[in-house]
Image (tube, helix red, strand yellow):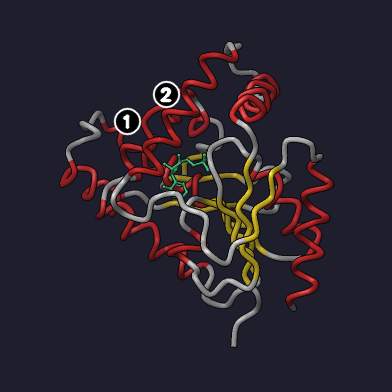
Amino acid sequence: DRRPIIAIDGPAGAGKSTVARSVAKQLGLFYLDTGAMYRALTWFVLEAGVDLRDEPAVAELAHQCEIDFQTDTAIPVVLVNGQDVTQAIRTPEVTAHVSTIAAQAAVREALVKQQQSYGRRGGIVVDGRDIGTHVFPDAEVKIYLTASIQERARRRQLDLKSMGQPAANLADLEQAIFERDRKDSTRTISPLRKASDAIEIQSDAMSVADVLNTIVSLYQEKT
Ligand code: C5P
Protein backbone atom coordinates (compact mmCIF):
# COMPACT_ATOMS: atom_id res chain seq x y z
CA ASP A 1 0.00 0.00 0.00
CA ARG A 2 1.58 3.26 -1.07
CA ARG A 3 0.81 6.94 -0.48
CA PRO A 4 -0.29 9.14 -3.44
CA ILE A 5 1.95 10.31 -6.26
CA ILE A 6 1.59 13.62 -8.13
CA ALA A 7 3.23 13.61 -11.58
CA ILE A 8 3.96 16.96 -13.25
CA ASP A 9 5.18 16.85 -16.84
CA GLY A 10 5.54 19.49 -19.50
CA PRO A 11 7.92 21.32 -21.82
CA ALA A 12 11.05 23.23 -20.77
CA GLY A 13 10.62 26.31 -18.65
CA ALA A 14 6.93 25.86 -17.86
CA GLY A 15 7.60 26.34 -14.13
CA LYS A 16 7.31 22.66 -13.20
CA SER A 17 10.01 22.65 -10.53
CA THR A 18 8.80 25.84 -8.80
CA VAL A 19 5.26 24.50 -8.74
CA ALA A 20 6.25 20.95 -7.76
CA ARG A 21 8.36 22.24 -4.88
CA SER A 22 5.53 24.35 -3.51
CA VAL A 23 2.93 21.59 -3.94
CA ALA A 24 5.22 19.20 -2.03
CA LYS A 25 5.73 21.72 0.74
CA GLN A 26 2.02 22.49 1.06
CA LEU A 27 0.97 18.82 1.16
CA GLY A 28 3.93 17.53 3.19
CA LEU A 29 5.18 15.32 0.35
CA PHE A 30 8.69 14.59 -0.88
CA TYR A 31 9.81 16.40 -4.08
CA LEU A 32 11.80 14.65 -6.80
CA ASP A 33 13.24 16.76 -9.64
CA THR A 34 14.00 14.19 -12.36
CA GLY A 35 15.35 16.86 -14.74
CA ALA A 36 18.06 17.55 -12.13
CA MET A 37 19.12 13.91 -12.44
CA TYR A 38 19.58 14.12 -16.23
CA ARG A 39 21.37 17.43 -15.73
CA ALA A 40 23.65 15.96 -13.04
CA LEU A 41 24.69 13.13 -15.33
CA THR A 42 25.25 15.60 -18.22
CA TRP A 43 27.48 17.68 -15.96
CA PHE A 44 29.40 14.52 -14.97
CA VAL A 45 29.92 13.50 -18.63
CA LEU A 46 31.10 17.00 -19.59
CA GLU A 47 33.51 17.04 -16.60
CA ALA A 48 34.91 13.67 -17.66
CA GLY A 49 35.57 15.05 -21.14
CA VAL A 50 33.72 12.15 -22.73
CA ASP A 51 31.97 12.59 -26.10
CA LEU A 52 28.26 12.99 -25.30
CA ARG A 53 27.28 10.80 -28.26
CA ASP A 54 29.53 7.91 -27.18
CA GLU A 55 26.69 5.84 -25.71
CA PRO A 56 28.76 3.00 -24.18
CA ALA A 57 31.08 5.52 -22.47
CA VAL A 58 28.10 7.57 -21.23
CA ALA A 59 26.44 4.37 -19.96
CA GLU A 60 29.60 3.54 -18.03
CA LEU A 61 29.61 7.02 -16.46
CA ALA A 62 25.91 6.69 -15.61
CA HIS A 63 26.82 3.80 -13.33
CA GLN A 64 29.65 5.76 -11.69
CA CYS A 65 27.49 8.83 -11.10
CA GLU A 66 25.76 8.69 -7.73
CA ILE A 67 23.09 11.37 -7.51
CA ASP A 68 21.69 12.49 -4.16
CA PHE A 69 19.34 15.24 -3.02
CA GLN A 70 19.35 17.23 0.20
CA THR A 71 15.86 18.56 0.64
CA ASP A 72 16.06 20.23 4.03
CA THR A 73 17.06 23.53 2.31
CA ALA A 74 14.81 26.07 0.51
CA ILE A 75 16.32 25.14 -2.87
CA PRO A 76 17.09 21.41 -2.91
CA VAL A 77 20.82 20.67 -3.08
CA VAL A 78 21.96 18.20 -5.77
CA LEU A 79 25.05 16.09 -5.09
CA VAL A 80 27.10 14.01 -7.52
CA ASN A 81 29.37 11.59 -5.69
CA GLY A 82 29.16 13.93 -2.71
CA GLN A 83 29.99 17.12 -4.65
CA ASP A 84 27.46 19.98 -4.61
CA VAL A 85 26.44 20.60 -8.26
CA THR A 86 23.24 22.60 -7.57
CA GLN A 87 24.47 25.62 -9.55
CA ALA A 88 26.69 23.77 -12.02
CA ILE A 89 23.79 21.78 -13.49
CA ARG A 90 21.89 24.97 -14.42
CA THR A 91 24.48 26.50 -16.74
CA PRO A 92 23.56 27.12 -20.41
CA GLU A 93 26.20 24.52 -21.37
CA VAL A 94 24.55 21.71 -19.40
CA THR A 95 21.12 22.90 -20.56
CA ALA A 96 22.21 22.78 -24.20
CA HIS A 97 23.49 19.20 -23.94
CA VAL A 98 21.11 17.50 -21.55
CA SER A 99 18.64 16.35 -24.24
CA THR A 100 21.41 14.42 -26.03
CA ILE A 101 22.16 12.50 -22.83
CA ALA A 102 18.49 12.06 -21.93
CA ALA A 103 17.70 10.41 -25.28
CA GLN A 104 20.01 7.43 -24.58
CA ALA A 105 18.48 4.08 -23.61
CA ALA A 106 21.03 3.07 -20.97
CA VAL A 107 20.80 6.48 -19.33
CA ARG A 108 17.01 6.38 -19.08
CA GLU A 109 17.07 2.83 -17.80
CA ALA A 110 19.47 3.70 -14.98
CA LEU A 111 17.77 6.95 -13.95
CA VAL A 112 14.16 5.71 -14.24
CA LYS A 113 15.04 2.80 -11.96
CA GLN A 114 16.31 5.25 -9.31
CA GLN A 115 13.22 7.44 -9.72
CA GLN A 116 10.90 4.46 -9.25
CA SER A 117 12.75 3.39 -6.13
CA TYR A 118 12.36 6.91 -4.65
CA GLY A 119 8.62 6.72 -5.34
CA ARG A 120 8.00 3.13 -4.31
CA ARG A 121 6.14 4.13 -1.14
CA GLY A 122 4.45 7.18 -2.71
CA GLY A 123 4.01 10.45 -0.85
CA ILE A 124 5.91 12.23 -3.60
CA VAL A 125 5.62 15.00 -6.18
CA VAL A 126 7.70 14.19 -9.26
CA ASP A 127 8.37 16.52 -12.20
CA GLY A 128 9.84 15.70 -15.61
CA ARG A 129 8.86 14.72 -19.14
CA ASP A 130 7.75 11.07 -18.88
CA ILE A 131 6.52 10.75 -15.30
CA GLY A 132 2.81 10.30 -16.05
CA THR A 133 3.41 8.29 -19.23
CA HIS A 134 6.23 6.01 -18.13
CA VAL A 135 7.85 6.41 -14.69
CA PHE A 136 4.64 6.45 -12.60
CA PRO A 137 1.77 5.61 -14.98
CA ASP A 138 -0.49 4.89 -11.98
CA ALA A 139 0.05 8.29 -10.31
CA GLU A 140 -3.14 9.54 -8.60
CA VAL A 141 -2.76 13.06 -10.05
CA LYS A 142 -1.20 13.76 -13.44
CA ILE A 143 -0.60 17.32 -14.57
CA TYR A 144 0.65 18.55 -17.93
CA LEU A 145 1.92 22.07 -17.25
CA THR A 146 2.49 24.34 -20.24
CA ALA A 147 2.89 27.98 -21.21
CA SER A 148 3.59 29.74 -24.50
CA ILE A 149 7.20 29.71 -25.63
CA GLN A 150 7.40 33.51 -25.23
CA GLU A 151 6.25 33.29 -21.61
CA ARG A 152 8.61 30.41 -20.87
CA ALA A 153 11.58 32.33 -22.32
CA ARG A 154 10.63 35.37 -20.23
CA ARG A 155 10.49 33.25 -17.05
CA ARG A 156 13.81 31.57 -17.89
CA GLN A 157 15.39 35.01 -18.31
CA LEU A 158 14.22 35.99 -14.82
CA ASP A 159 15.51 32.66 -13.38
CA LEU A 160 18.94 33.12 -14.90
CA LYS A 161 19.07 36.66 -13.59
CA SER A 162 18.12 35.58 -10.08
CA MET A 163 20.85 32.91 -10.18
CA GLY A 164 23.39 35.60 -11.08
CA GLN A 165 24.07 34.04 -14.49
CA PRO A 166 25.03 36.22 -17.49
CA ALA A 167 22.14 38.04 -19.19
CA ALA A 168 20.59 36.18 -22.13
CA ASN A 169 18.38 37.73 -24.78
CA LEU A 170 14.83 36.52 -25.23
CA ALA A 171 15.20 35.40 -28.84
CA ASP A 172 18.16 33.18 -27.92
CA LEU A 173 16.28 31.72 -24.97
CA GLU A 174 13.21 31.02 -27.13
CA GLN A 175 15.43 29.28 -29.66
CA ALA A 176 17.14 27.15 -26.98
CA ILE A 177 13.79 26.17 -25.43
CA PHE A 178 12.31 25.36 -28.84
CA GLU A 179 15.29 23.16 -29.69
CA ARG A 180 15.21 21.31 -26.35
CA ASP A 181 11.45 20.65 -26.64
CA ARG A 182 11.94 19.43 -30.19
CA LYS A 183 14.60 16.93 -29.10
CA ASP A 184 12.67 15.85 -26.00
CA SER A 185 9.41 15.29 -27.89
CA THR A 186 10.87 13.52 -30.94
CA ARG A 187 13.23 11.05 -29.25
CA THR A 188 12.38 7.34 -29.55
CA ILE A 189 12.33 6.42 -25.86
CA SER A 190 9.69 7.98 -23.59
CA PRO A 191 9.35 11.27 -25.47
CA LEU A 192 7.69 14.29 -23.88
CA ARG A 193 3.93 13.63 -24.16
CA LYS A 194 0.79 14.57 -22.30
CA ALA A 195 -0.52 11.35 -20.72
CA SER A 196 -4.05 10.61 -21.94
CA ASP A 197 -5.34 10.96 -18.35
CA ALA A 198 -3.30 14.08 -17.47
CA ILE A 199 -4.97 17.42 -16.78
CA GLU A 200 -3.47 20.22 -18.82
CA ILE A 201 -2.78 23.55 -17.14
CA GLN A 202 -1.88 26.42 -19.48
CA SER A 203 -0.17 28.83 -17.11
CA ASP A 204 0.47 31.99 -19.19
CA ALA A 205 -2.06 34.03 -17.24
CA MET A 206 -1.60 32.21 -13.93
CA SER A 207 0.62 32.99 -10.95
CA VAL A 208 2.57 30.24 -9.16
CA ALA A 209 -0.06 30.45 -6.39
CA ASP A 210 -2.87 29.93 -8.94
CA VAL A 211 -1.20 26.81 -10.33
CA LEU A 212 -0.42 25.56 -6.81
CA ASN A 213 -4.06 25.96 -5.73
CA THR A 214 -5.34 24.19 -8.86
CA ILE A 215 -3.09 21.17 -8.25
CA VAL A 216 -3.80 21.02 -4.52
CA SER A 217 -7.58 21.01 -5.24
CA LEU A 218 -7.18 18.22 -7.79
CA TYR A 219 -5.18 16.23 -5.25
CA GLN A 220 -7.83 16.74 -2.58
CA GLU A 221 -10.59 15.62 -4.96
CA LYS A 222 -8.71 12.44 -5.81
CA THR A 223 -7.58 11.34 -2.36
O1 C5P B 1 13.20 19.70 -16.21
P1 C5P B 1 14.53 20.16 -16.79
O2 C5P B 1 14.38 21.26 -17.78
O3 C5P B 1 15.53 20.44 -15.73
O4 C5P B 1 15.03 18.86 -17.58
C1 C5P B 1 16.26 18.87 -18.26
C2 C5P B 1 16.25 17.84 -19.37
O5 C5P B 1 16.24 16.53 -18.83
C3 C5P B 1 15.05 17.87 -20.33
O6 C5P B 1 15.22 18.83 -21.36
C4 C5P B 1 15.04 16.44 -20.86
O7 C5P B 1 15.97 16.28 -21.90
C5 C5P B 1 15.52 15.65 -19.67
N1 C5P B 1 14.45 15.03 -18.90
C6 C5P B 1 13.91 13.85 -19.37
N2 C5P B 1 13.00 13.17 -18.64
C7 C5P B 1 12.57 13.65 -17.47
C8 C5P B 1 13.08 14.87 -16.97
C9 C5P B 1 14.02 15.55 -17.74
O8 C5P B 1 14.28 13.39 -20.46
N3 C5P B 1 11.69 12.94 -16.75
What is the x, y in percent for residue 34? Answer: 50, 52
Q: As displayed, is residue 166 above or below residue 27?
A: above
- Which residue is pictured at 65% across the width and 24% down the height? 163
Judging depth in this view, the residue of 69 and 11 nearest the camera is: 11
Mark 1 residue crowding within 10 angstroms, few (<14) / some (14–19) / many (20+):
some
What is the x, y in percent for residue 108? Answer: 33, 55
Amino acid type indicated by mark 1: Leu
Quadrant of the image occupied by residue 146: top right
What is the x, y in percent for residue 213? Answer: 83, 55
Q: Nearer the viewer, mark 1 or mark 2?
A: 2
Q: How many discs mark residues in the rendered view?
A: 2
Judging depth in this view, the residue of 159 and 134 nearest the camera is: 134
Name the residue beneath numbered marker 2: 93
- Which residue is pictured at 21% across the width and 31% down the height? 51
- Which residue is pictured at 72% across the width and 59% down the height? 24
Name the residue beneath numbered marker 1: 46
Which element type, helix, strand or loop, lies under badge 2?
A: helix
